[in-house]
Image (spheres, rainbow, N blue to C red):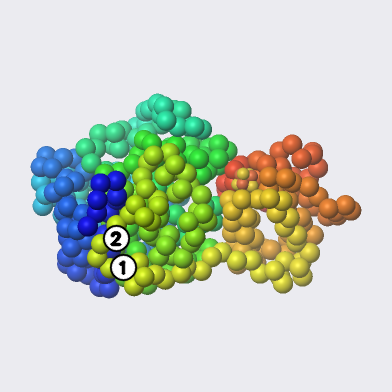
Amino acid sequence: MPVKNQSIVSIERCARHGDLEAVRTALTHLLDRIGGIESIVSPGDRVLLKPNLILDRVYTTGVTTNPQVVFGMADLCRAAGAREVVVAEGSAVGADTGAVLRNLGFYELAEQHGCRIVNFHQDTYEHVVNPMGKNIKRIRMPRSWMEADVVINLPCMKTHDALGATLGLKNMKGVIHPQDKKRFHKWGLEQCIVDLSHLTLPELTVMDATIGLEGDGPVVGDPVNLGLLLASKDTVALDRICLEIMGFDRDEIGYVHLAAEAGLGRDDPADIVVTGASVADVKRPFRRMSLDQDKLSELDIRILPCDACSGCQNVISAYLNGRQADGTLEQLRGTTFVYGQNPHLPDGATGDIVRFGSCTRTMSTEGTYIPGCPPHPALINDTLNKIR
Ligand code: SF4
């Protein structure tokens, strides 16, 4: 039994994740252990559901939220008396959110379930002050998010190139203006996720772990058929339990701990009560991103981490793996990537130098500099495509 000052995370198995009726039943059991949907949605509420629809990849790839989870939740909200249920998303920078929603069948499903779809990128944005933010004191937020009485976050469980893992806290980044998404990399991605959470902490987070994503997430990895749903009113606690299931150590994913330190939730396992299935029963370590070192040596591509945190390390790995996958890694032959908080080059370094990440800003004027903390993938492509 939870006691005062403890958060509850509910875990439910959901093997038949393509069957709406089975998913709705699993969601009901999942939520009943944390007070039921009626403890979150009151009659007359306007509810906003925020899935992860980063690109138009079907949920069986592990990249997007299972539509059965989204519309199963919509049905439960309506049964609890919601006046309106809005399904809202702003996809990845550069992606056409309308096309993503259309290609994944969300407009059709919304009509069937009596929901309204909102494309955040076509919404009206207004500036909101964020007095608790360290790096973000003021940010544009969409009107539909501000008008919601209840926000329910519906992320999926994935590895992530810059953060190690993307879960509940990170999913709310989809709410903000595309220009601010890019700026997060300039201002420091991890702290920005925490700052944003001061504004966007949802009333409930339901993690779609029916199919997760491992390897080079958040869009390129391999699906993991987990058949699980998790829920909590404490998104930080939920993220912590998800990380345990995925096999990440507590200090491995910095922003979840930073969020707990900022008072946004609990991340000490001693303060979290798990109900339903146990973590030990459902644990399934996720494969991390890795680099083909033999291939890099063959092409004389050197990466020099100089006290780097995982942000730049992961983003470089994702970038190089992407070039290998599309057959263009050869073009980087002889390139040295230097990054980290104490950047330096070995004596006699030759070839093209890429100074990667804001930590290398003051290093020297030598080579190509890519700013960002860590750099945004679009900026890396733009910069390196010009020289290679
Ligand atoms: S720029 Fe520096 S602090 Fe930022 S992610 Fe890269 S190594 Fe870490």
Within 8 Å: ligand 1 and the Cβ of disc 1?
no
Q: Amino acid at mark 2?
A: Val
> Residue at left 42%, top 30%?
132
| Residue 247 pos. (x, y %) | 46, 65
Please tell me how crowded label 2 is: few (under 14), some (14-19), or many (20+) other residues with Cα within 10 Å.
many
Q: Residue at 72% of width from left, 45% of height from top?
A: 342
Residue 169 disc label:
none
- Evaluate whether residue 99 shows in this view: no
Residue 82, position in %: x, y?
14, 45
Q: Which residue type does callout 1 highlight?
A: Ser
> What percent of the width, then of the height, locates residue 12?
26, 66
State the residue position of label 2: 274
Image region (quadrant) for ligand 1: top right
Residue linked to disc 1: 278
**Cα distance between the residues tagged 2 and 1:** 7 Å
SS of the residue at dot 1? loop
Is 176 or 41 nearer to us in this picture? 41
Q: Is residue 195 left or right of residue 373?
A: left
In the image, 378: left or right of 201?
A: right
